[in-house]
């Protein structure tokens, strides 16, 4: 089967460029099935975008751990450095 580029590693599948995919032939007795993806299906869904926004908001609420020191801030981004304290057992 020929279809869109893989979204994950599959050991027995290989991505082809447009030129090679167009010239691909199958062995005698086999059929080549070409899948034409729906461009709308490749776009992120509203649920995907909302999940990403929620994840970003959640990270923004996290406070630095006790052993971290905030050394710089720009907007909602922080630069943290290890305070150098050794954890007590």
Image (cartoon, rainbow, N blue to C red):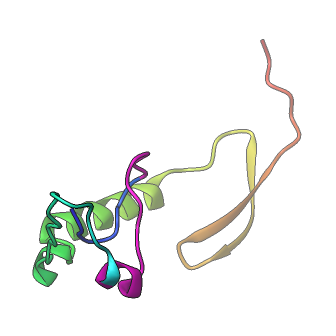
Please say if 80 is above or below 66: below
- For image coordinates 26% across by 65% down, the residue present is 26
5 left or right, relative to 79: left
Residue 19 included in the magenta stretch of the image: yes
Q: In this view, does 6 lie above or below 17?
A: above
- Magenta span: chief secondary structure: loop
Please name whichever residue, 69 or 18, is drawn nearer the observer in this view of the structure: 18
Q: In which quarter of the image is the C terminus?
A: top right
67 part of magenta stretch? no
Corner quadrant of residue 27:
bottom left
Q: 21 or 74, which lies in front?
A: 21
Q: What residue is rendered at 15% in x and 76% in y?
A: 37
Q: From the viewer's perspective, tell me whether residue 2 is left or right of residue 59.
A: left
The magenta-colored residue range is: 9-22
Please state the horizontal and vertical placement of residue 36, each as a whole percent of the image.
Answer: 14, 78
Q: In which quarter of the image is the N terminus?
A: bottom left
């Amino acid at each position: 089967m020929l279809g869109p580029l893989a979204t994950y590693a599959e050991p027995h599948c290989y991505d082809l460029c447009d030129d090679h995919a167009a010239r691909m032939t199958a062995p005698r007795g086999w059929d080549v099935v070409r899948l034409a993806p729906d461009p709308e299906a490749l776009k992120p869904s509203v649920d995907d975008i909302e999940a990403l926004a929620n994840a970003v908001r959640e990270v923004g609420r996290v406070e630095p751990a006790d052993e971290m020191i905030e050394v710089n801030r720009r907007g909602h981004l922080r630069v943290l450095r290890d305070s150098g304290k050794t954890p007590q057992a």
